[in-house]
Image (cartoon, rainbow, N blue to C red):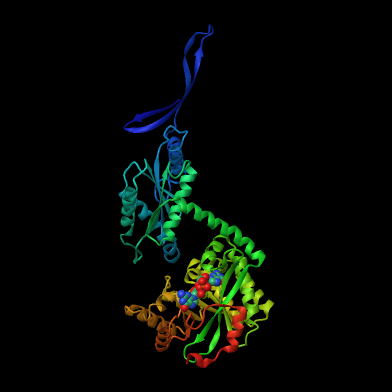
Amino acid sequence: MLVPARVAGQLQWWSLTAKPLHDGAGQWQGWRGVGSDITAARQRELEMARLAHIDTLTGLANRYQFGKRLAGYFAPAASAGPCTLLLLDLDNFKTVNDSLGQAVGDQLLQEVAQRLQSVLDPLALLARLGGDEFALLLPGMLERPEAERLGAQMQDVLAQPWTANGHRIAVHASIGVGFAPVDADTAEQLLKVSDMALYAAKAAGRHTLRFFDPALALRAQQHLAVLSDLDQALQRGEFVLHYQPQVDLASGALLGFEALVRWQHPLRGLVSPLEFITVAEESGLIVPLGAWVLRQACVDAVGWPAHLRVAVNLSAVQFGNADVLAVVDNALQHSGLPSARLELEITESTLMHDSQAALAVLHALRAKGVRVALDDFGTGYSSLAYLRSFPLDKLKIDRSFVSILDAADGDSSAAAIVQTIVQLAQALHLETTAEGVETAAQFEQLRRMGCAQAQGYWIAKPMDAAHARAFIMGWSDAALA
Ligand code: C2E
Ligand code: MG
Ligand code: MG
């Protein structure tokens, strides 16, 4: 028998075991046994049970406890009934974690847990499901406006700036909401639909809230279809490369082309990389696809005049793959393209993900004579320290700054940003290429600002390999002078 006992005001646990004693005639005489104080063991056991149910970092319920509570809302449990699930995911957690370190990331998660709890009523179960994903489970189906209000309240309390190691960090969260039984009749399904809503919230821009609706399920199905289609597309040879010219702003000389992949889909026609690169990254298909792109681009470029370069986009996923150097070597050897004619475009996220590894790969690429450009510059979180420590050849100024250069509303901050980037690049001995140049006015302004190179519809749209060859033949430096 396990007996609680209070001794001098302290709770203790005793374990009592005993055997009945009988005399020769079988008459009961009493008990003989042992009593021991097992308070310490009992406390350990309770602590283990508690730990199994809580997330040790934040003290919130963990996935296990959340799963048990969620299952309880669905029959046959006695506690079955309607419920509302809000899934919340921090928008910029990965950046914080990557740039400021895991210790700061952990502090941030603790802060988030505390803030969320401060606005919630005690009937709600707040859990951390893993990483930067939180779940809020409420009894009953909330009215939509009510759920929206609750979501906004959570977003507001998180958006209060938070300071760590002298960095001021604003936390934004996306929220997806699902209701049972209207959206789901099992626990797994409620999780799934809320997750789709969360995905939609993220896609709609950050810091938003979305409810599940059946159209989302359809879209998720299409996403899956793209995934399985993509897999076969590579085997069927359905990818093609288009090439967009890059020119020297001062002389008007043609410098080379950027290779941009497209999917020649048998039913849908030419599909933009924006529709499939992310999916390919998530599924890992980007590794063989990227290797194909690199090989094909080198094969095409080797047929161009020897002064022209080819730029190829590398995804962070490819870059994190140890084989990236072998893939580059392979493409160069296979095609016979001199390494100095190959430029690789990487993004800031590639550098932030695993900086030490990225640094080593960049040095190895540069040692081969391959050039490296930082794509979409200005949209990420690059710090000056990064720019100085990574061996780069070029910054590509993101289209979003270029496109508003000559805007009618006269937004002068875009001009100031572009000018600053150009000066920064000059100080660091980096070339600059302005992306997305669409008008003569933008072209002129960039030239005046001292930007070295340009790429954009005003010069030419991306074109297939045959048209690129014709474009080279017909090019005259004077055309842009
Ligand atoms: P990116 O590397 O920044 O490429 C530039 C994008 O801007 C291209 O879109 C290009 O067609 C578009 N663009 C160029 N000039 C203009 C202009 O004047 N105005 C406008 N509005 N757009 C212009 P695209 O081809 O749709 O590619 C989108 C993105 O997909 C690329 O952005 C790149 O991040 C990615 N991507 C394309 N090909 C590959 C690839 O082979 N591998 C990887 N990992 N990513 C790729
Ligand atoms: Mg690019
Ligand atoms: Mg770009």
Residue pictured at 62% horizontal, 76% vertical:
297
Residue 189 x, y percent position in the rendering: 49, 45
Closer-to-camera residue (122/467): 467
Q: Is residue 164 visible?
A: yes
411 versus 185 height, above or below: below
47 versus 201 height, above or below: above
Residue pictured at 64% horizontal, 65% vertical:
234
Residue 353 x, y percent position in the rendering: 49, 66
- Which of the image's four quarters has the N terminus? top left
Toward the top, the furthest residue is 25
Residue 48 x, y percent position in the rendering: 46, 41
Closer-to-camera residue (479/291): 479
Residue 359 x, y percent position in the rendering: 53, 73
Closer-to-camera residue (463/249): 463
Quarter of the image where one finds residue 280: bottom right
Residue pictured at 42% horizontal, 42% vertical:
180
